[in-house]
Amino acid sequence: MDRAPWNEGELSALRESLRAEMSEKRYLHTVAVEDMAARLAAIYCPDETNLLRAAALLHDITKELDTATQREICRERGIALSPDDEMAPKTFHARTAAALIPERYPAFNHETVVSAVRWHTTGHGGMTLTEKLLYLADYIDESRKFPDCVRLRTFFWDAKPERMSEADRLAHLRRTLIMSFEMTVRALLCEDAVISIDTMDARNELCREEKAANAK
């Protein structure tokens, strides 16, 4: 599907349908991510605001499924899981949510939405702007109270990105994302957990871009 972003009524209908399918905690997080995604889009890509809002609403549609069900969805749809993936079941929902959007929410089967949902947990090398913004919105939405989330949210907004030039805004986004990936890596190391190659690729690419920008 390739069409113009949805109107307010369509997004409201999607939001209400999700309320009936999610726990209260998951629903409150979801609408908080939608709000943050809209705030970020207003600064970085106003024309794609409703695309990001739709992606935010759909990003956790399979989050509350058990691991066995997540694996079954992957198996049925030919989604390959590497040995490292198998050791990080908390990341399954990004794959399964993206896979189920065309089936369960065909009206929202838009490439930008599906890709943002697919990569909102690990990131990956070559992230698009909308992928970066959903990843960040999920990390710093106002429902997040973990110290790293609060610290990153404060770092991002205290810099007043809405007052920056376009170049400075993008540089600030890059630095914020680098910080977020490094927070994630540190947390995983403390848990003796496997670190996704996609996360390392995303972080390393952004670091290369930052180093090149600073060398100018």
Image (tube, rainbow, N blue to C red):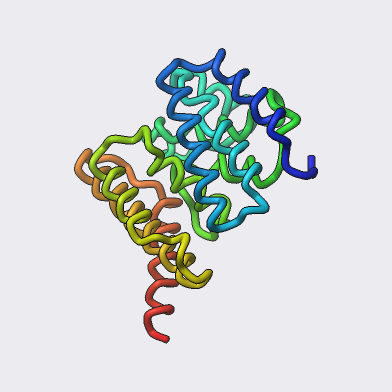
**Would you identify the image quadrant in which residue 202 lies?**
bottom left
Coordinates of residue 152 in the picture (x, y in percent)? 31, 50
Task: Give whichever of 90, 63 is nearer the camera.
Answer: 63
Q: How many marks?
A: 0
Does 52 appear above or below 162? above
Coordinates of residue 198 in the picture (x, y in percent)? 45, 51
At x 55%, y 58%, the residue is 44
Does 205 appear above or below 8? below
**Would you identify the image quadrant in which residue 106 lies?**
top right
Does 18 appear above or below 85? above
Task: Give whichever of 10, 173 is nearer the camera.
Answer: 10
Coordinates of residue 63 in the picture (x, y in percent)? 47, 25
Report the side of 43 relative to 183 (left or right): right
Quadrant (top left/top right/bottom left/bottom right) for the C terminus: bottom left
At x 44%, y 68%, the residue is 171
At x 55%, y 44%, the residue is 38
Which residue sits furthest bottom? Answer: 216
Which residue sits furthest left? Answer: 190
Coordinates of residue 46 in the picture (x, y in percent)? 62, 53
Report the side of 55 relative to 137 (left or right): right
